[in-house]
Structure formats: C-alpha cells, structure tokens
Image (cartoon, helix red, strand yellow):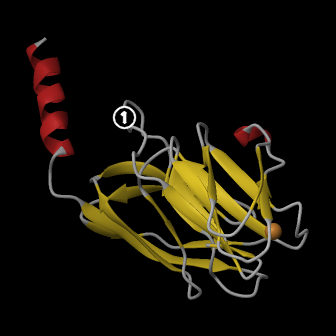
C-alpha cells in the first residue's frame, strides 16, 4: 500500500517536471516535398486531455484550404473562414466526422465544426471540386506538421515512453516507440 502511494506520488511529481521537446525530420518518399506530414503522440494510457477552448482556423483563400493540413487535438472546434469573393462550401466524406456538410457561405463569414473523435478528415468544397484540405484530430496536445524540409518540433513534451505516429495525405502512416528524455530526436521515413 505504501509502495503504491509512493509510486503514485512519484508519477505525479514526474508529470510536473519541466518538459523537453520532440523534434526531427520526416522523409516523404515519392511526393513533391516533405511538407504536410502530421507527427503526434498517440493516446497516453491513464491520461486524458480536456478539449481546447481555443478554436482552430482553416481559411479558404484563392481557392485553396489554408493550411492544407491542420492537426488539432480531439475536441477542438475548427472555424472555416471564407476569405474569397465567391461562395465556398465545406464538407467531408469521412465517417469519423459524421460526413459533415456546413453549407455554403460568402466572404467574411465562418462556419464551425467540432472534431469529437480521432479523425483524418478530408475537406472538400462542392463549389470548387479541385479544392482539398485535411483536418487531423489526434488524441493528445502533442503534435506538429512538417515543413517542406521535413523538419518538425513538438514543444513541452513530458519525459516518458510514447508511441509516436506519422500521418500524411498521400503516404502510408507509420509509428514507432520513442523514449522522450529532455530534448529528443525521432526521424521517420514514409512512402506510398
Ligand atoms: Cu470553394
């Protein structure tokens, strides 16, 4: 009993230690560059994270979704904003977000959707069939998206043993076990 209590206390203290970071590069084989890969910590057993109060934003500007790939924590509300002088629509064909369809709205207005489940949602616009974007809802607040050179950085990651996953719109997903201790590097290579 005493040992169990000590363990719980020790875990509690460990959870409040100054956090490190997880960084590295993702090599994306067979695509234009190494951008748009989402790197994130998978669900952590025994840990839950409250839904973020702050909304995330996807713009529709010059007939593209900006950003092209947006990672968010599960529970996040995303505001879809029309920045163009034409009508836009946003819908998703994916069941993980209930195949939402937010309707059609003019410049300067937004409509919102809350991602309640883990999801890799394709975003489409009925008005402009060439438009495509992605919202990736992940189970922890620890995520990043790669730049064109493949680099990523996830700040304030607690020390511990985690499953780190990588998702890309066109490439096979990957994952590996990573032990984070302070500033930690983890590199990935993904392909079709
Ligand atoms: Cu559109």
Q: Seen in the image, is 165 located left or right of residue 92?
A: left
Q: Seen in the image, is 79 located left or right of residue 48?
A: right
- State ligand 1's quadrant: bottom right
Q: Position of residue 50 (x, y in %)?
A: 38, 37
Q: Position of residue 135 (x, y in %)?
A: 64, 57
- The foreground one among 182 and 107 is 107
Q: Seen in the image, is 90 located left or right of residue 151?
A: right
Q: Is residue 185 shown above or below 177?
A: below
The quarter of the image holding the C terminus is bottom right
- Indicate the secondary structure of the residue bearing disc 1: loop
- The foreground one among 129 and 141 is 129
Q: How many marks?
A: 1
**Which residue is most to the top?**
1
Whether residue 171 is visible to the viewer of this picture, yes or no, is no
Q: Is residue 122 shown above or below 11?
A: below
Residue at the image position 27 percent from the left and 53 percent from the top: 159
Mark 1 — residue? Answer: 47
Q: Is residue 46 shown above or below 85?
A: above
- The foreground one among 98 and 5 is 98
User: How many C-alpha atoms fall within 10 Å of the one at disc 1: few (<14), some, or many (≥20)?
Assistant: few
Residue at the image position 15 percent from the left and 57 percent from the top: 18
Q: Position of residue 23 (x, y in %)?
A: 40, 72
């Amino acid at each position: 009993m005493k040992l169990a209590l000590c363990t719980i206390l020790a875990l509690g203290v460990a959870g409040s230690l100054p956090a490190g970071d997880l960084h590295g590069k993702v090599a994306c084989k067979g695509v234009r560059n190494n951008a748009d890969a989402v790197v994130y910590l998978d669900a952590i057993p025994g840990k839950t994270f409250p839904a973020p109060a702050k909304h995330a934003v996807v713009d529709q500007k010059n007939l593209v979704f900006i950003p092209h790939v947006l990672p968010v924590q599960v529970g996040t509300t995303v505001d879809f904003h029309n920045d163009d002088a034409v009508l836009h629509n946003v819908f998703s064909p994916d069941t993980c977000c209930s195949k939402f369809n937010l309707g059609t709205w003019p410049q300067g207005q937004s409509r919102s959707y809350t991602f309640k489940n883990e999801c890799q949602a394709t975003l489409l616009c009925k008005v402009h069939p060439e438009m495509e974007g992605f919202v990736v809802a992940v189970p922890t607040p620890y995520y990043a998206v790669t730049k064109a050179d493949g680099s990523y950085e996830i700040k304030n990651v607690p020390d511990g043993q985690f499953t780190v996953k990588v998702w890309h719109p066109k490439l096979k997903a990957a994952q590996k076990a990573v032990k984070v201790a302070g500033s930690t590097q983890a590199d990935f290579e993904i392909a079709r």
